[in-house]
Image: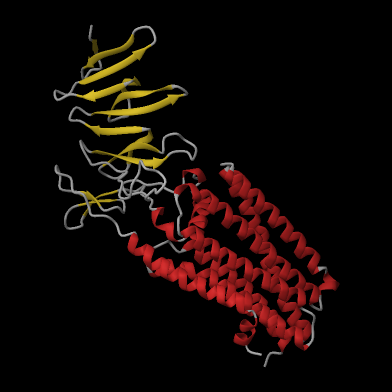
Amino acid sequence: MLNSKTTIDKKMIYYSFLMIFIFIIEMAVPYRRGIVSIFLYALTPIRVLICKYMAYSFDRENASSRDFKACIKAFEILSWIFIIDFLGNLVLTVPFPRHMVMHSFYFFMITMILEYVVSSIAYYYYYVSSKIDNSDGMPRVWSILNIIITILLIFAFTKLLAGENDTSGMLIFWSIIFFLIRETMVIVSGCKIKKADS
Amino acid sequence: MSFWSYLKKSKIQLVILLVLIITSVILSIYLNRLNTPPKRMYDIDNDLAWDYNGHYVDRDGNIVVDCKYFKDPKRFKDNPRNYSIYMLATSIVFDENIYNYPTFAAAGMVDDYPYTPLFTDSYRLAGNFTGGYATFGIPADFNSFYPFNYGYIDMNGDIAIPPVYQGAWYFDDNGYAIVYQETGIGARGYGIINTKGEYLLEPIYEHIKREQDGTFSIEYFSNEEGTMYGNADIDGNITWEE
């Protein structure tokens, strides 16, 4: 049976994959009325529950051995951001006239960047609290990668609003590349932690 | 401690989440009912109608014209988050200007505009097919004075004449259509085009009206002469009234 430490590391990897998977679903599933609409609507509350579950897992870890208070806080904040996101979706659904569309676009883009930043912070503290971090500078590389991706996303967003789609597309392409590197780090680090533990 | 008891620790969050979920499901069901497409309007000439999904269909629902450029983002109105992601994706993938959203619509129906009296629900942006062509509209730039730009599609559903006009009317038997176009700051007016999109009469006229015999009565304003009235034949020759 897996011990608790390995489980939380695995959970972090699963969490990472799950969040990406949900985002891909949101991007790829074409909008249809009825059940698909409700399903797409339900993705944000599912995210809230996932965040709460991660906070719960870290809380259990925290009680047993390691100090994960910062991670718990970050996941709690993230769940609140998702609730605000969901609330925004609901509030904007009611009137949703044409002149509000761009405002809703700003709102969701900003909350998405915010969600990304807060989840990055959660990961950062997770690395800090893990065993191997201080030896291979994982948190430093992690935070640098995240800062690069965040800056790229903000630039892409502003360029998109300025109508420069080519530049924006390029910036998003690079942020995806960095994001893939980041995700590879998650898997590698998860394996490393598991190896160090066994 | 189980996950459920952990969730119960933050009661406010849980209550808010549950209330939001219930409200959104009710709202989604309600809006879906609200968004049912209007009745099809069949043309008298060919007994065909737009199905509001980019198809020109007969009474049995068989597709006669498939509008390839049809996009239907109107149904996103009950999920603004998904709509924003759609806007983001289409702007990047298809390199389309974000300000042209939300209502690219061809051969379909646009959202109702509760704050814009000009457009009501079930307003059709696509015209009927006459002479093998139908008008269609896409939203203009976000800050444009004119809400839509119009062009023409052919019976294959392809764009025959791109949407560059601020007003476009049907083609007659001679293959001419009246259009309204803004060609620059302060330069705008009614003109006449052929099926290739070439001007028979430049868009500089105050008004153009189609007559029974296929000719056009025109109205032109100049600072020197004032308002002038005339008649244009199908070759574009104008006869001014004294």
Q: Choose between A173 and B233: the one closer to the eye.
A: B233
In this rendering, the count of numbered labels is 0
User: Which residue is pictured at 31% across the width and 54% down the height?
Assistant: B53
Q: Is residue A195 left or right of residue A94?
A: right
Q: Position of residue B131 (x, y in %)?
A: 20, 35
| The C terminus of chain A sits in image quarter | bottom right
User: Which residue is pictured at 22% across the width and 9% down the height?
Assistant: B241
Q: Choose between B38 and A25: the one closer to the eye.
A: B38
- Extreme residue in the bottom direction: A1
Q: Position of residue A10 (x, y in %)?
A: 67, 80
| The N terminus of chain A sits in image quarter | bottom right
Residue A58 location, quadrant: bottom right
Q: Is residue A129 left or right of residue B167?
A: right
User: Which residue is pictured at 49% across the width and 51% down the height?
Assistant: B90
Q: Position of residue B89 (x, y in %)?
A: 51, 54
Q: Choose between A41 and B97: the one closer to the eye.
A: A41
Q: Is residue B1 left or right of residue A137?
A: left
Q: Position of residue B148 (x, y in %)?
A: 39, 38
Task: State whether residue A81 is above or below residue A189.
Answer: above
Q: Is residue B203 left or right of residue B56?
A: right
Residue B227 location, quadrant: top left
The chosen color scheme is secondary structure
Residue A33 visible (yes or no): no
Residue A13 visible (yes or no): yes
Task: State whether residue B160 is above or below residue B107.
Answer: above
